[in-house]
Image: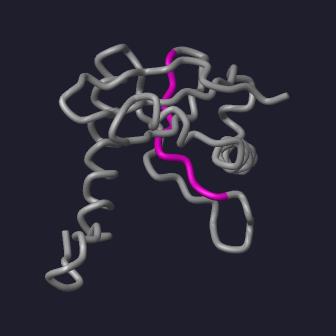
Amino acid sequence: MKKTDSNKAPLPDKSTDCKTGHRCEKWAQMLLMLKGYIPVSRNYVTGRGTGAGEVDLIMRKGRLLVFIEVKKRATFEKALHAVTIENQARVIRASAAFLQRNPQFSDFSIRYDAVLFAPKRMPRHIKDAWRVL
């Protein structure tokens, strides 16, 4: 946390937030591995100019490929609400780009999950958090 001056509330430090986000992604990956998922990619980025975006985790279980959004907020409800329609669309676009570049997964079933974190609580894995319409 950085402080702007003595009369104002502390502002979050971006480097701390980023570290926390990456830490949550690592914890989410370990949680899913304990459930039998196999890591495929973490922080998959489609590339500049594609407009597709980034996926926090890509994991597989058998013939199922799962694209996972990880969110940490003050409560699980706030974390769930942070997985917005725009956020879902970004992950869907990134998943399409991933599948185009990785044809070995073309015959896999696809699912979109979320792993939610809240302070002093065990993380929640939300299977099938959203679907492509």
* The N terminus sits in image quarter: bottom left
**Outermost residue, right side:** 133
Q: At which x and y percent is residue 80?
A: 51, 32
Find residue 7 and report its image quarter: bottom left
Q: Is residue 17 left or right of residue 55?
A: left
Q: Which residue extends farthest front?
A: 7
Tell me which residue sits at (19%, 78%) in the image.
3
How are the residues colored? one colour
Tell whether 32 sits left or right of 105.
Answer: left
Asked if the magenta segment contains residue 42, the reply would be no
- Residue 109 in the image: above or below residue 13: above
Determine the image quadrant of residue 49: bottom right
In front of the other: 7 or 130:
7
Vertical placement of 8 versus 132: above or below?
below
Give percent across and percent down for residue 50.
Answer: 74, 66
54 lies above or below 49: above
**Residue 44, placed above or below residue 115:** below
At x 69% / y 20%, what residue is drawn? 109
Which residue is at the front of the view, 74 or 58? 74
Please report the residue visible at 35 percent of the width from the left and 42 percent of the height from the top: 25
Say which quadrant the C terminus sits in. top right
Residue at the image position 30 percent from the left and 60 percent from the top: 17
In percent of width and height, residue 112 lies at: 62, 28
- Residue lying furthest left: 6
Chief SS of the magenta region: strand
* The magenta segment: 53-61
